[in-house]
Image (tube, rainbow, N blue to C red):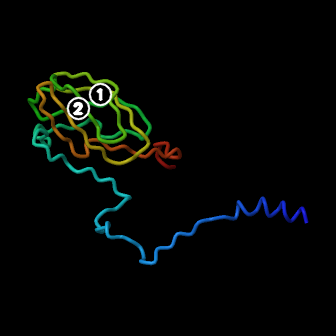
Amino acid sequence: MTRIAMLAMVALPLAQGCIIYNADGWNDDWDDGDWDPLVDEEPAPTDTAVDVNPLGLYLDPPSIDAGGMGIISLRGAEGVDLSEVASVEFHGEVAVHALQARANEAVLSIGAGAETGFVDATVTFADGEAYWLVEALEVLSTDETDTGLPCD
């Protein structure tokens, strides 16, 4: 009898649970059907202080491996002076470690996180002008089996 009592003392606290029942059904009044949790959409800025790339700014090369580091150049249309670039900010898992602005390019040392896909950027000049670069950089997936060598 003592074994049964001890087993009951151990088993009863472990067997307790809670069942929540909603008699009215699922409450999905908040869901309008337009949101997809698998898509991370960052809208273009609506602030009038940020223009969407009228200077023809672009990154060269336009991609980096996920989890990697690299040096890329920010360039613009002919005649654009980039020596006054104050900062470049990526809107995703990309960090700028160093920036050196020159007349015809701004050289960036960057590091990418594990998240892949396109990343937007904001380029800010010393006078406060800011420009939004849509899908400025692509963070590529790294496949350990891909050596980059042609198949035999």
Of residues 50 and 25, the one drawn nearer to the viewer in this rendering: 25
Q: Is residue 38 above or below residue 60?
A: below
Q: Residue 53 sits in which quadrant?
A: top left
Q: Amino acid at mark 2?
A: Leu
**Would residue 29 be found to the left or right of residue 14 on screen?**
left
Q: Amino acid at mark 1?
A: Leu
Report the number of numbered marks: 2
- The residue shown at (53%, 46%) is 145
Could you tell me which quadrant the N terminus lies in?
A: bottom right
- Which residue is denoted by mark 1 in the rendering? 108
Of residues 141 and 44, the one drawn nearer to the viewer in this rendering: 44
Q: Residue 84 sits in which quadrant?
A: top left
**Would residue 26 be found to the left or right of residue 34 on screen?**
right
Mark 2–mark 1 contact, CB under 8 Å? yes
- The residue shown at (12%, 35%) is 77
Of residues 93 and 70, the one drawn nearer to the viewer in this rendering: 93
Q: Is residue 14 above or below residue 124?
A: below
Q: CA distance from mark 2 to mark 1?
A: 7 Å
Residue 134: give x, y in percent of width and height.
22, 45
- Residue sitting at the far right: 1
Using the image, tell me which numbered label, if any, was put on residue 4. Answer: none
Q: Residue 16 sits in which quadrant?
A: bottom right
Q: Is residue 30 above or below residue 40?
A: below
- Which residue is denoted by mark 2 in the rendering? 74
**Would residue 8 be found to the left or right of residue 120 on screen?**
right
Classed neighbour count for the residue bearing mark 1: other residues with Cα under 10 Å, few (<14), some (14–19), many (≥20): many
Label 2: state its secondary structure. Answer: strand
Whichever of labels 2 and 1 marks the residue nearer the N terminus, that label is: 2
